[in-house]
Image (spheres, helix red, strand yellow):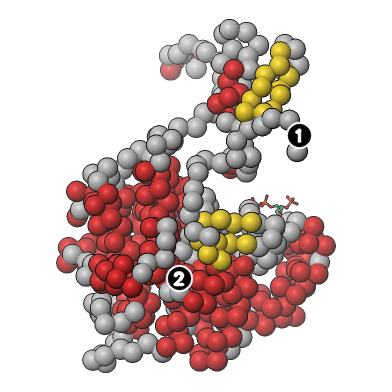
Amino acid sequence: MSGNNTLTITDNRTGKTYEVPIADGTIRANDLRQIKTDAQDFGLMSYDPAFLNTASCRSAITYIDGDNGVLQYRGYPIEQLAEESNFLEVAYLLLEGELPNKAQYEAWTADINVHTFLHENVRKFMDGFRYDAHPMSQLISTIGALSSFYPEAKDISSHAQRYSHIVRMIAKMPTIAAWSHRHSIGFPLIYPDPELSYAGNFLSMIKRITEDEYTPHPVLDRALDVLFILHADHEQNCSTSTMRVVGSSNVDPYSAVSAAAAALYGPLHGGANEAVLRMLKEIGSKDRVPQVIKEVKAGERLLMGFGHRVYKSYDPRAKTIKKLADQVFDVTGKNPLLDIALELERIALEDDYFVKRKLYPNVDFYSGLIYEAMKFPTAMFTVLFAIPRVAGWLAQWNELVEDKEQKIARPRQIYTGPALRNYVAMDKR
Ligand code: SDX
């Protein structure tokens, strides 16, 4: 590569030329402001609806190579972490930047284990939801309510405060999630069991009825833990960007996580796994697949669980989840909807409409099949996404708080409204 790291821009409106530095494959949008037609001109801005080509931050947490289907947490390939690690160890890695040694891991898990309970007033707060309230609505509201239980969390400048509320949120997510499910089916709440693993404790609070002890099936316990690893972070996706934008106002982390969870709830994002299952159930049988593909190609519907803003090749998480599905189905029995999913994938991977648009199965395409096989109601699927993603949101938020280059997020706009005009009295309109 010849020449220096600059971009030469000629403004053909004025004939003037500008040198703009290139760093880390980017130019600073603010460097465009010098490009003006005259002294009154505000200067050029970049326009990027949905931030298709805008880097909002520097981050050392997750690396994605969308063209080659690569996903790494702090440099470790997701495939290795899914194989060798566990969710709490991955949560530590995302937050601290290194895998913990034995002493660090024991201290971390001990901190998590003592914070899995919820204040009894939170239980009463959750009692107020309608019996059929969607678990995601309950989750979003309850996390937000936690900010009123821990007002000291507002002191985000204190590393110790940030650590203690990061631990609380990671620890309490399974409890809030399980209680939102038990509330919606009218079952008594089960309290956390610190003897069980992170995923096992969640399964116990979901499944336990009257047995004195609940021992999760080891294959299902491990499968859920691996799903938590795969969903823990994914760089600057919609919900993480929301966490960063809301966090940039220096609000407490509970309020920021509540906003991020609301973003995840959308069917184009974390709500997709629920939408995939509803789509597969609506399709009903393999022989209806060609008709559905026809409707998708006619632009009449989306193939939920397909496509990704970054992955223009197979989502590496989907590959791992597909392998995990076989292990789970060996225990639970095969999910009949799997055949429909496999047929959809087979046709989509051959059909030019999908190939041309680089539409491949994403993380949500197969995860719902596992959740359904484990007898989770469809409405719980996005909650199962949110539980581990809280670790990613908090790691990204922590990085934002410590990033000296960051300040409150406040984008600009292209104004398309009416020019100046005077108020007209009602009787003259
Ligand atoms: C997650 O960002 C992340 O990292 C998210 C996530 C994470 O871990 O945080 O990975 C988790 O949210 C995964 C995505 C889950 N969502 C879905 O499965 C919903 C279905 N997918 C689509 O809505 C879509 O693919 C998105 C939203 C995921 C990505 O949309 P983009 O990048 O904005 O792509 P686009 O809408 O510009 O689509 C490009 C073309 C369009 O066709 P043309 O207008 O060019 O003719 O592809 C088409 C789209 O119509 N297209 C689809 C499609 N997705 C895109 N056509 C049919 N079915 C689809 N699913």
> Could you classify mark 2 by the number of other residues whose Cα lies within 10 Å: few (under 14), some (14-19), or many (20 or more)?
many
Quickly name the residue at label 1. 2
Q: Earlier in the sequence, mark 1 or mark 2?
A: 1
Quadrant in the picture for residue 261: bottom left
- Decide if ligand 1 comes within 8 Å of the CB at mark 1: no
Residue 296: x percent and y percent? 73, 62
Q: Secondary structure at mark 1?
A: loop
Query: Seen in the image, is 19 located left or right of residue 243?
Result: right
- The amino acid on which the numbered mark 2 sits, given as a three-letter code, is Phe
Instruction: Give residue 178's quadrant in the image.
Output: bottom left
Q: Where in the figure is residue 1, as x and y percent of width and height?
A: 75, 38
The CA distance from mark 1 to mark 2 is 45 Å
Out of 76 and 118, give the one closest to the viewer.
76
**Which residue carries the number 2 mark?**
228
Residue 28 seen anywhere in this rendered image of the structure: yes
Location of residue 271 in the rendering, given as x and y in whole percent from the top left corner: 51, 62
1 shown above or below 199:
above
Closer to the observer: label 1 or label 2?
1
Q: Is the C-beta of the residue carrying label 2 under 8 Å from the nearest atom of ligand 1?
A: no
> Where does ligand 1 appear, by image quarter?
bottom right
Residue 211 percent coordinates (x, y): 26, 92
As helix, strand or loop, the secondary structure at mark 2 comes to helix
| Number of residues whose C-alpha sits closer than 10 Å to that of mark 1, classed few (under 14), some (14–19) or many (20 or more) | few
